[in-house]
Amino acid sequence: MPTPLRVTVWNEFVHERTNEVVKNIYPDGIHAVLADALREHLGTGVQVRTATLDEPEHGLTKEALKETDVLIWWGHAAHDKVANKVVRRVQKRILQGMGLVALHSAHASKIFQRMMGASCMLRWREAGERERLWIVAPGHPITSGLQGEYFELQHTEMYGEYFDIPQPDELIFLSWFEGGEVFRSGCTWRRGAGKIVYFRPGHETYPIYHDANVRRVIANAVQWAAPSGAAYVGKGRNIPEPLNRIENPIAEQDVH
């Protein structure tokens, strides 16, 4: 794992400037609160920068991504405003080994849909319901430091199945909502040399990212998604000579 781990927290930074409720919860932006959570849990082991939609190239230039080990993505109202060339650039870096942690409404982001190869759509209801997140992969690094078999959020936006994603490599959390729905709330995948985490909690009108358990999970997810350091070979290679001589038993037989 790189030391310190270089993390870019990307946030479209729209709701915080247009919605008074969101502004009161996240006055400096969701990205600022996420960055603080990483510093809180990872200390000197992390170097955090933030980037937002309105910056040139959305703050995700080639140079910035080259210096990023893990990218956290939060978006909701402006998925369509993200330039396709930037999405392709991020995809390339993930395949090369950069980690991606997609949060809440990032399920509908261009980059997450591109990496999943699916619509990633779901059911939802904004009713401030209680959510219980069951830990279904106890012992996984992403659950490190959590106490008990589940944790709860008292007021959340409901996400429900069916969630149109590829079968996760690992299912970490399964949510239950008081309205009756369930949801795969913590999933991981590998794409190329990169690791991807989807973590559901985070609706902007609730103080989800101030919750101690949520902050710990995100910090754990960043550590888990860090590059392994293995080389990525993603191009076709023509190998004209075999590693060992290929024998042709028929040609070498005595034919009478």
Image (spheres, helix red, strand yellow):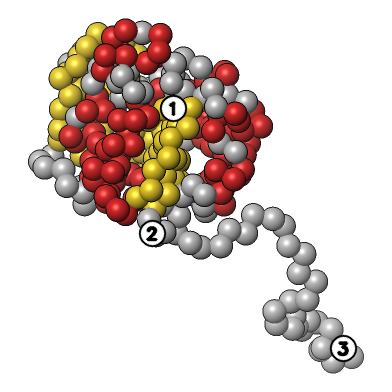
- Could you say which quadrant of the image residue 200 lies in? top left
Say what secondary structure mark 1 lies in: strand
Screen quadrant of the C terminus: bottom right
Q: Which mark is residue 25?
A: none
Q: Earlier in the sequence, mark 1 or mark 2?
A: 2
Whether 228 is drawn above or below 165: the answer is: below
Q: Amino acid at mark 1?
A: Asn
Q: Nearer the viewer, residue 155 or 14?
A: 14
In front: 222, or 61?
61
230 is higher (above) or lower (below) than 98: below
Q: Which quadrant of the figure has residue 202?
A: top left
Residue 222 in picture, x, y percent from top left = 36, 45
Which residue is identified by label 3?
255
Kindly state the secondary structure of the residue where label 2 is placed. Answer: loop
Q: Residues within 10 Å of mark 3 (few under 14, many from 20)?
A: few
Residue at numbered disc 1: 11
Q: Position of residue 129 (x, y in %)?
A: 20, 14
Q: Percent position (x, y) of residue 229?
A: 48, 61
Specify whether residue 163 is in view.
no
Tell me which residue sits at (84%, 92%) in the image: 254
| Image location (x, y in percent) of residue 206 | 25, 17
| Residue drawn at 32 percent across, 14 percent down | 23
Q: Which residue lies most toward the right here? A: 256
Report the side of 10 relative to 192 (left or right).
Answer: left
Tell me if mark 2 has few (under 14), some (14-19) or many (20+) residues whose alpha carbon lies within 10 angstroms of its own.
few
Return the mark for residue 3: 2
The front one of 72 and 13 is 13
Instruction: Say whether residue 8 is left or right of residue 61.
Output: left
Q: Give the side of residue 244 with respect to residue 20, left or right.
A: right
